[in-house]
Image (cartoon, rainbow, N blue to C red):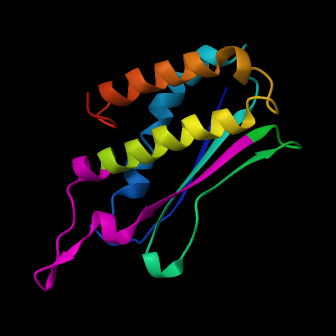
């Protein structure tokens, strides 16, 4: 099982979403490779950091021709760079990672539930993948204990 990563984020110093998203290559090595013989699809993940005003919605889709499960995730700019007291207050990289981790983990759970009958192997190994993902996410500071 492999991962494909992409992002759509501002190039500003305060936005660390793309950089943090690249940490999922470690997830591929530590977790997904364990499922190479069990889950044959690729996991495509796109992290977008966009303003609320764009009204963009997260999406998920199984690309049958490419045998890939795609997750297009949204982290709102206002969440990681709140405007209070007349100023922007960007969150630290660690705080941004926790926000992304929660979004990624919850979206992965929901995606596997939705596609369990459409993507081979999810029924048998989806719960185990979620448990391994949870352990990885805590270990790598994507989720708090």
Eyeballing the image, is 112 above or below 107?
Answer: above
Q: Position of residue 60 (x, y in %)?
A: 67, 50
Q: Would you identify the image quadrant in which residue 49 lies? A: bottom left
Q: Would you identify the image quadrant in which residue 52 lies? A: bottom left
Q: Would you identify the image quadrant in which residue 136 lies? A: top left
Marker count (numbered):
0
Magenta residues span 69-96
Quarter of the figure that contains the N terminus: top right
Eyeballing the image, is 56 above or below 46?
Answer: below
Eyeballing the image, is 139 above or below 80?
Answer: above
Q: Residue furthest bottom?
A: 86
Eyeballing the image, is 89 above or below 141?
Answer: below
Q: Position of residue 22 (x, y in %)?
A: 45, 45
Q: Is residue 97 left or right of residue 120?
A: left
Q: Residue at point 76% right, 24% down? A: 40
Q: Residue at point 26% right, 27% down? A: 145
Q: Nearer the viewer, residue 88 or 33?
A: 88
Q: Residue at point 66% right, 33% down? A: 113
Q: Position of residue 138 (x, y in %)?
A: 32, 28
Q: Position of residue 74 (x, y in %)?
A: 50, 60
Q: Is residue 124 visible?
A: yes
Q: Residue at point 26% right, 69% down? A: 81
Q: Is residue 108 magenta?
A: no
Q: Nearer the viewer, residue 115 or 139?
A: 115
Q: Is residue 30 visible?
A: no
């Amino acid at each position: 099982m492999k991962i494909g990563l992409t992002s759509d984020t501002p190039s500003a110093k305060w936005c660390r979403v793309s950089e943090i998203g690249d940490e999922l290559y470690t997830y591929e090595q530590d977790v997904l490779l364990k499922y190479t013989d069990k889950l044959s699809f690729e996991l495509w993940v796109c992290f977008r950091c966009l303003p609320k005003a764009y009204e963009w919605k997260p999406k998920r889709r199984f690309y049958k021709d490419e045998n890939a499960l795609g997750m297009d995730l949204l982290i709102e700019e206002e969440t990681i760079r709140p405007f209070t007291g007349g100023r922007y207050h960007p969150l630290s990289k660690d705080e941004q990672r926790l926000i992304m981790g929660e979004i990624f983990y919850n979206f992965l759970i929901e995606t596997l539930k939705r596609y369990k009958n459409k993507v081979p192997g999810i029924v048998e190994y989806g719960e185990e993948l979620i448990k391994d993902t949870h352990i990885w996410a805590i270990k790598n500071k994507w989720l708090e204990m």
